[in-house]
Image (cartoon, grey):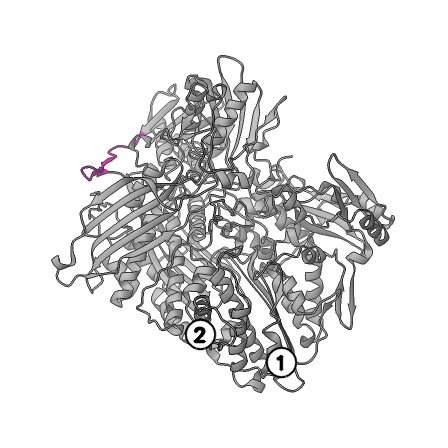
Amino acid sequence: MCGTKLGCGEGGCGACTVMISKYDRLRNKIVHFSVNACLTPICSLHHVAVTTVEGIGNTKKLHPVQERIAKSHGSQCGFCTPGIVMSMYTLLRNKPEPTVEEIENAFQGNLCRCTGYRPILQGFRTFAKDGGCCGGSGNNPNCCMSQTKDQTIAPSSSLFNPEDFKPLDPTQEPIFPPELLRLKDTPRKTLRFEGERVTWIQVSTMEELLDLKAQHPDAKLVVGNTEIGIEMKFKNMLFPLIICPAWILELTSVAHGPEGISFGAACPLSLVESVLVDAIATLPEQRTEVFRGVMEQLRWFAGKQVKSVASIGGNIITASPISDLNPVLMASRAKLTLASRGEKGEFFSAFKQASRREDDIAKVTSGMRVLFKPGTTEVQELSLCFGGMADRTVSALKTTPKQLSKSWNEELLQDVCAGLAEELHLAPDAPGGMVEFRRTLTLSFFFKFYLTVLQKLGRMCGKLDPTFASATLLFQKDPPANVQLFQEVPKGQSEEDMVGRPMPHLAADMQASGEAVYCDDIPRYENELSLRLVTSTRAHAKITWSPEVTMNNKGFFGGLFPLASVLVRASVAVIKHCSGGSQATTAGISLYRSGLIRGLSLLPPGELYIGGQEHFYLETHCTIAVPKGEAGEMELFVSTQNTMKTQSFIAKMLGVPDNRIVVRVKRMGGGFGGKETRSTLISTAVALAAYKTGRPVRCMLDRDEDMLITGGRHPFLAKYKVGFMKTGTIVALEVAHFSNGGNSEDLSRSIMERAVFHMDNAYKIPNIRGTGRICKTNLPSNTAFRGFGGPQGMLIAEYWMSEVAVTCGLPAEEVRRKNMYKEGDLTHFNQKLEGFTLPRCWDECIASSQYQARKMEVEKFNRENCWKKRGLCIIPTKFGISFTLSFLNQGGALVHVYTDGSVLLTHGGTEMGQGLHTKMVQVASRALKIPTSKIHITETSTNTVPNTSPTAASASADLNGQAIYGWACLKHINVSLFSSRTPNLGYSFETNSGNPFHYFSYGVACSEVEIDCLTGDHKNLRTDIVMDVGSSLNPAIDIGQVEGAFVQGLGLFTMEELHYSPEGSLHTRGPSTYKIPAFGSIPIEFRVSLLRDCPNKRAIYASKAVGEPPLFLASSIFFAIKDAIRAARAQHGDSNAKQLFQLDSPATPEKIRNACVDQFTTLVGYLDKFPPHPGMDRVNI
C-alpha cells in the first residue's frame, strides 16, 4: 500500500495521517482518532486497528469523503490528499454531522501547498449540518452566491453540484475487528519488544513502572512519541530503553474534586480538551477561569493528530522554554491537580503568539492570574508566568510581590509594565532572536490581561474605554464564505466538447483513494540500493577529488550554466556581503534630475528587503535510476519539471549520447519551480551510483535535507529613487535590484531579468532606470520559484507607489489608477500593450468588492477601536507570458490513434498538480472531435517527446496545447509527433528592442485585513480577485490555480521566513520551524471572478496562462497590513498618517508589532538604550 505519504517525518504536514481505533476501557466504548504515521511507533499499536486511505474506498467505489474532495476540485498535486481524506474520515466516524467549525478544526494538522484550501473546505462543508453549500440553488438569503449588491457580473453555475454526491451512510463503515473487541475484558499483560538498539516495554501497572524506573533510571517514558520521535530522527539521539505507560489506569484516568480536575499524566491532550469543554458548560463561570485559559492554549496547541496522542504529563516534563501549557499551569498553581478553586474575585487568562495561529510553536506564551481581596479591587495574589523569555518557564517574581494590596488601576499598570520590562530582559543574541518583539509581547499580554480584568470587574473600576474593548476579545473566525464566478460555455456547445467546462482533475479519484503512484511509490527492484547525501559541515572549503569519481570531468553544471558541481554541495554558511556580483539587466534611461522638471518632488531614497521562500512541495526530490546493462542505457524515474536537462546532464556525466538515457515522469507532488533545475542535484548523483554499482539506486530526500540543499526563491534588496508630481503622477524612477543567488548562477540571471522587466508592474513611467546585480554567497543556489522574479520586481513598484500616495496625501487607489498603462502604450522595454484588459479588471474589482463603501467602514472601525486596526488595499498585476530565453518557447506532442478509436496522448509538459494533463486532454478532445474518455495520458518521457522545455513559466498549456492542435490539423494521420514554436519572440538589452513576452496576463485583488496592534497578529477578512485568463480552458482548474497562487503569495508576503544561525546554518528545515499558510490562514471571504468576454488570440482556444500571474495579487494583503499599521501609528505614536515607515517582506507578527509604535515599544526601546541601574527611577508609559 502506498496511499499514506511521507511529507516531513516530524508530524507537521499531515500527509501521513491514518485513523486509529481502539476500545477505551475507561469510557467503555470504541474510539477513533487520527495520528501521524511518521511519529507513531509500531510497538504502540498492540490491541488497536489502523485504517489507511486504502481501507475506506477505491476508484471502483469511492467513499463519500474521497468522492467529494475529488469532485469539488480539492486535489491538485494530490500528495497531501490521502492525509486530508483521513482527517475528514476520522471526524465523520466520531460525528457524522459535524459543524463547519469542527470541520475546519479537523484540518489544523494538515497542510496543502497547491489548492489554497478553499475547494477542500467547500467540498467537505457539504457534510456539515450547518454549512453545506447549496451551490446558489437554495432559499437561504445569506447564501454566499446571493450577495450581488453592486456586483457587475451575475454568478455562473457552481464548479460542482452537491446533489451529485453520494450520501454518507455511517452504517456502512467497516466494523471494529471482533478479535480486538473480544480482548476488552482481558487483563493486559506487559509487552516487551526488543530491537538491535532499542527495547520497548509497554507496562500495565504502576508497580511495574516504578520497578522499571528504579532499575533503569535513564529510561524514557513515552506516550505519544511526539517529542522523543523528533529527537531520535533529527537530533540522532538514542534511547536504549523506552517505557510506555499508556495502559496504566492511574495515569489515564480523570477525577473531579473540590480543588478542580485531576488528570493522569498519560491522558492525551484531546481528552483534557473534551473534559474541560464539558466542565465549562456545566460549572459556574467563576469556577472555570483556569479551564478557559487552558482551553485557549489547547485551541492552537497542535493538530488533532498530535493532540490525540500527546500527553499532558509529557508536555510538562519536556520542560520546553516555549511550552504553551506550562506558564498556564504555573500561574494557576496547578500541582498534581489542575487547580481551580473558583474563588470569587479570581481572574485568569492565557496568551500565545506564534508565526502562524494553527499548529505553531509559540514565540512567547503566558498564563496570568489575579485574586482580589473580597469585595475590593485590591490585589491579594498575582501570578504572571511566561514561556519564551528564558531557558525555562519563568514567573515574574520580582514584579508581582510589589503589586500586593494595590488597586487594579492605571498606576498598577504602569508599575507592572515597567517591572516586566526590567525583569524579563533578553540579551541581544538570545536564542530564538526577535528580542524586541518578545519583550514587547510580555507587556502587551499584561495590558490585555489588565483590560480583561477591568472589563470583568465592571462598575468596581469604572467604565472601560469602549475603544479599548476589542483588545480583550479572543480570536474568532467566522465560517468561510466563498464565491467563484466564471463564464459558462456558449449555448449550443456540444456536451462532448469539454473545453471551457469545470472538468475535475483526471487523477483526482486516484489521488483521493491513495492509488496514484508517485516516484517513491514504485515497488522496490531486486538488489536495489538506497542513496543518502552527506552535506558539508563547512560552507566554503577546498575538496580533494578522486580521479575515479570525476567521470570524464563532465560533472559540472548549474541550471543552464556550467557553474556548480553535482558531487559537492556547500550549504551551511552565508557571506554577509555581496561578492562577485554581475550586472544582469539595464532597461530604460537615466532618472531626470528634479531641477529639469518644474514641480517635481522626490521621495527620500528608500530601501525594501524581500525575504526568500522555500518551495515546500509536499513530495520532496526523488529519483530511481535503473541501469539496463546494454550500451550504457539507463532508465530513470524522477520527480522533475525538466526531463531534457535531467537527461542531458546524466548523459554528459556518464559520457554517453542522450539517446541512451530515458527519463520518465508520471506525476509530481508539487514543483513550483523547485524541480526545474535543482532536481538534477539528486538525479545525477543517483545515476552515478547506479552506473558504478550496476544496480538500481533510489534516493528520496528527507524534508530537512531537501530544505537544506535545494535553495528557494531569491531574496531581494531594492534601493529606489522616485520623482513625482504633487498630483500623484510618476515622472521618474530608478531602482537598483540586488538578489542573493547562492553559490552558483543556476537561473539567477533570467530571474533578475524578469524582475527588471516587471519593475513597472502596471504603470507608465516616462523616465526609468533599472539595474540588477546577482550576489554570490556561500549558500545553496537559489532557483526558480512561481513568479520567477516577477513578484519581487512588482512588490518594489507597489511599495514606492504606496509611499508616493501617502506623501501626496491622496488615496492610493487614485494614484495607482492615474498612473496605469492604457491600451497601445509601450512598456519600458518597448513592447506594445495589446488587449490590455487591466482597466476592466480594476473597475470590476472596485465594484464587486464594494471598495468605496468598505473603505468608509474601515475608517469607522479604526476610529472606534484603539488596539485593533483594519486596512484595505487594491493591487493590480501585469505578468508577461513566455520564457525570456526565446528558444525555450516550443512544445511537442506525440499522438497514437489505435484501431479501437482510443488515443494515447503524450506531450512535453509534466504534471505537478496544475492540471496540465487534464487541459491537454480537453484540447485534444476538441481538436480530434472525440470524447475525453477516449484519450489517455500515461506519463512524460524523453523517449516519446524529445528536447522538451521545462514545465515552467506558466506557458506549458500554451506551448503543448498548440502542438496538439497543430497535429490535429494535419491531414496525414500517420504523422504522430508534432512540435510548435512561439513566433516573434526575442529581446535585446543592448538596443532595448524586441518582444520578451508573447502576451500579458492581468488581474486585480482587493483585500481587507485586521491587525492586533498589541501582538502583531492579523486576520485576513476578505479578498476579491478579478483575473483575466482569456477564455478559460477549464474554469475549475484556473480558479484553483488563482487561489493556490494567491495563498502561496500570502505565505511569501506575510508568513514564510527563513532563519539562519549567526554562522549561516539554516534553522528552518521543516514544518515545525518554517510556516506555510494553513487552512485557517486564507481570507474568511474569498471571492474569485474570471473576467468575461476577453478571448486571447495568441494562445490555444483563446485561453491565457494562469499558474504564476495571480501570486503577486497576495501583496494586497501585505499593503492592507501596512495600511492598518499606518492607522495605528497615527493614533499611538508621535507620527502622523503621512509619515513614511519601512516594512520589509514578509509582514510577520514580529514586524507588524514592532511597526505599531506605542508606549510599550517605546518603553522596551528606552530600556535597551538605557539599561536600569539601582536607584534609577521607573520610566512611565
Magenta residues, start to end: 981-995
Q: Which residue is drawn at 28% across and 48% down?
A: 736
Q: Nearer the viewer, residue 786 or 515?
A: 786
Q: Is residue 384 left or right of residue 1153?
A: right
For the residue labelled by badge 1, is the local secondary structure a helix, a strand or a loop?
loop
Give neighbour class at mark 1: few <14, some 14-19, many 20+ (Cα, 10 Å): some
Query: Which residue carries the number 1 mark?
Result: 404
**Which quadrant would the N terminus be assigned to in this image?**
top right
How far across and how far down the image is residue 1076, in percent?
Answer: 50, 50
Q: How far apart are marks 1 and 2 (CA)?
A: 29 Å
Q: Residue at x 74, y 43 (%)?
A: 45
How far across and how far down the image is residue 601, in percent?
Answer: 20, 62
Q: In this view, does 326 lie to the left or right of 1104?
A: right
**Kind of residue at disc 2:** Cys
Give neighbour class at mark 2: few <14, some 14-19, many 20+ (Cα, 10 Å): many
Q: In this view, does 784 lie to the left or right of 358?
A: left
Q: Nearer the viewer, residue 685 or 947?
A: 685
Q: In this view, does 901 lie to the left or right of 131?
A: left
Q: Which residue is drawn at 59% across and 32% down?
A: 521
Are the residues at dot 1 and dot 2 in contact (C-beta closer than 8 Å)?
no
Q: In which quarter of the image is residue 353?
A: bottom right
Q: In which quarter of the image is residue 445?
A: bottom right
Residue at the limit of the structure toward the top, as seen here: 631
- Is residue 1141 visible in the rendered structure shown here? yes
How far across and how far down the image is residue 518, in percent?
Answer: 55, 34
Look at the image and say whether residue 49 sits in the magenta stretch. Answer: no
